[in-house]
């Protein structure tokens, strides 16, 4: 037996490889000229021929099936890229409640029921609006004036009062308090000209200077000029006087420890600016001087007080059907206020362009800083948007004041006045302003002076039966305190919760009765808050009780009235 040799050599036979297996009979059956198609079933159309070609390739190259998922996905991607999805509905989320200005739509809905509501009259509304009172008796002014002589002065204080009418008022009263505390002589405050208010008025243009000096003579020395021998040291130029940069809300201790030594050294110091440079929390002696300055010594100059008293008298005449009682509304809806708030109303693109331009004019670059995000909806929800004239009218009608109620409107030039004021005039046709109460000739001396015009509004608002504030600021804060000082400790002021109002005005399903209940609740809350006492960090200019007023028991008040 010969061994098997794998290496072939010439002349020797080698074993043949095994035959290939036969293919499946079904593919061999009928094979002839027609190839793999059964006889008599040749593809007739081009589509059938292509289908058979693809099928035969797949069957011969079975690895193609591994790439089938990839081919499928690629085809789907190509298909999606050629199809427009604009037809797919875009679901826009509903804005949060209270974030959109829908008051005009609400007014149209409620107006029929509002006009037909005869459940209250203007006389009833004004007569019964204030129900809360101090249980232990009312408060009366009781500022104890000094009867002792003043010691020798430690020097002169000169302050520059900045801001508008009531910010300047803050500076004046604080300057009186500081001068009295340091036993210094106060020079009549200088009013700093501001680029926004653009009012060049001096102290004597706004207030009665002689009355101011005489009212304080037993408590604080006030003069209208610095002695010549002192001014010679500074070349008669007040800007050469040492300017003390006092931090905002500084305590009286700071004035004693830091300012007084410099005053004794120099004999005169200047503090500029001076607004809000004294803490609200101060000793009783300092608070008493603030009270005396604000509520007794500051009296408007004769031209202002004469016209203002005439305006009050005319308002009472026009309110004869309500026993001379009227409502005063402080409305802040001027263009600059609307722009500064960054709120959106219903002006569309035109409003957007105007507000952007107004913000750039007044606060160049402040609102366009990189990274600053303005969210008008969140601002409205937080109650930071100024109320529109329409919203003020809706609120007052809901509080029970009908269209026979006399309204005095204290405001500047309303943004888009003709459009915005129309609904308010529909609801309160007896509405008046200083322009409708006074003649052009009477207003001419005040027309270009914002502080003098504000003084007219201040006086008419002070003597109203109801004062409505729609926005924060110094004007309503001073009126709150002044009205408390005049009306037994009660501010008689409606201060609406604007967060709550934002939700109510944005509720399309609310009816007139439910709306009225909500407004009466806000009115009642304002009534209860009207008799608040001052807390440690509150302003004495808004809360005069108990620093500027004393409690009078009801029994004592009754005995005194009987005796008289």
Image (spheres, rainbow, N blue to C red):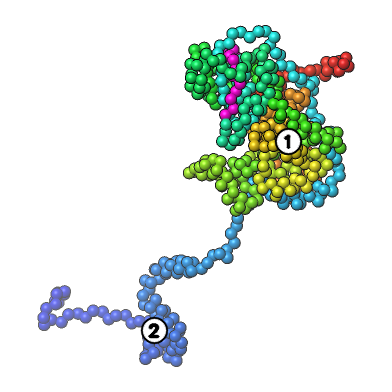
Residue 108 located within the stretch drawn in magenta: no
Which residue range is magenta in the image? 181-192
CB contact under 8 Å: marks 1 and 2: no
Q: Taking the image as drawn, is residue 495 in sight? A: no
Extreme residue toward the left, this view? 10
Looking at the image, residue 398 lies above or below residue 165: below
Write down the residue under mark 2: 27
| Rendered residue at 84%/48% (across/down) | 116
The residue tagged with tag 1: helix, strand or loop? helix
**Frontmost residue, 441 versus 41:** 441
**Frontmost residue, 499 versus 289:** 289
Which percent across, then down, holds residue 109?
Answer: 76, 51
**Frontmost residue, 351 versus 46:** 351
| Rendered residue at 75%/37% (across/down) | 438
Quarter of the image where one finds residue 476 = top right
| Rendered residue at 62%/41% (across/down) | 337
| Left/right of residue 161 with respect to residue 76 in the rendered view | right
The dot on residue 442 is 1
């Amino acid at each position: 037996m010969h061994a098997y040799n794998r290496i072939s050599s010439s002349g020797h036979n080698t074993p043949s490889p095994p035959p290939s297996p036969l293919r499946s009979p079904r593919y061999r059956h009928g094979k002839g000229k027609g190839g793999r198609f059964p006889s008599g079933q040749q593809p007739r159309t081009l589509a059938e021929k292509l289908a058979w070609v693809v099928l035969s390739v797949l069957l011969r190259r079975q690895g193609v099936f591994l790439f089938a998922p990839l081919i499928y996905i690629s085809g789907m991607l190509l298909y999606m890229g050629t199809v427009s999805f604009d037809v797919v509905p875009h679901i826009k989320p509903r804005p949060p409640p209270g974030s959109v200005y829908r008051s005009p739509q609400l007014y149209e809905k409620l107006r029929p029921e509002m006009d037909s509501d005869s459940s209250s009259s203007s006389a009833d509304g004004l007569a019964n609006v204030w129900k809360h009172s101090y249980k232990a008796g009312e408060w009366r002014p009781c500022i104890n004036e000094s009867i002792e002589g003043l010691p020798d002065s430690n020097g002169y204080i000169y302050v520059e009062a900045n801001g508008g009418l009531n910010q300047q008022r803050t500076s004046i009263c604080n300057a009186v308090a500081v001068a009295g505390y340091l036993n210094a002589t106060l020079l009549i405050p200088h009013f700093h000209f501001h680029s926004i208010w653009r009012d060049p008025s001096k102290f004597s243009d706004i207030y009665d200077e002689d009355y101011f000096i005489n009212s304080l003579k037993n408590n604080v020395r006030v003069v209208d000029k610095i002695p010549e021998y002192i001014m010679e040291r500074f070349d008669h130029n007040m800007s050469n006087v040492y300017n003390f940069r006092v931090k905002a809300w500084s305590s009286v201790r700071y004035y004693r420890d830091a300012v007084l030594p410099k005053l004794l050294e120099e004999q005169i110091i200047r503090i500029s600016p001076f607004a809000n440079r004294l803490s609200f929390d101060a000793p009783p002696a300092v608070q008493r001087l603030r009270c005396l300055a604000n509520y007794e010594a500051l009296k408007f100059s004769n031209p202002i007080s004469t016209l203002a008293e005439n305006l009050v008298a005319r308002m009472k005449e026009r309110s004869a059907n309500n026993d001379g009682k009227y409502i005063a509304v402080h409305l802040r809806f001027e263009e600059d206020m609307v722009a500064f708030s960054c709120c959106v109303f219903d002006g569309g693109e035109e409003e957007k362009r105007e507000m952007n331009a107004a913000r750039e004019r007044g606060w160049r670059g402040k609102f366009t800083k990189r990274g600053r995000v303005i969210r008008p909806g969140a601002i409205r929800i937080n109650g930071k948007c100024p109320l529109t004239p329409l919203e003020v009218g809706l609120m007052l009608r809901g509080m029970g004041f009908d269209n026979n109620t006399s309204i005095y409107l204290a405001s500047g030039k309303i943004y888009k006045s003709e459009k915005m004021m129309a609904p308010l005039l529909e609801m309160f046709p007896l509405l008046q302003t200083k322009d409708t109460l006074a003649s052009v000739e009477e207003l001419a001396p005040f027309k270009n002076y914002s502080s003098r015009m504000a003084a007219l509004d201040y006086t008419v608002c002070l003597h109203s039966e109801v004062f409505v504030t729609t926005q924060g600021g110094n004007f309503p804060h001073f009126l709150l305190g002044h009205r408390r000082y005049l009306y037994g400790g009660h501010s008689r002021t409606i201060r609406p919760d604007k967060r709550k109002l934002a939700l109510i005005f944005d509720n399309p399903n609310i009816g007139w009765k439910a709306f009225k209940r909500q407004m009466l609740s806000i009115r009642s809350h304002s009534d209860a808050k009207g008799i608040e006492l001052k807390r440690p960090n509150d302003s004495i200019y808004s809360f005069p009780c108990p620093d500027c007023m004393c409690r009078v028991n009801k029994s004592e008040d009754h005995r005194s009235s009987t005796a008289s």
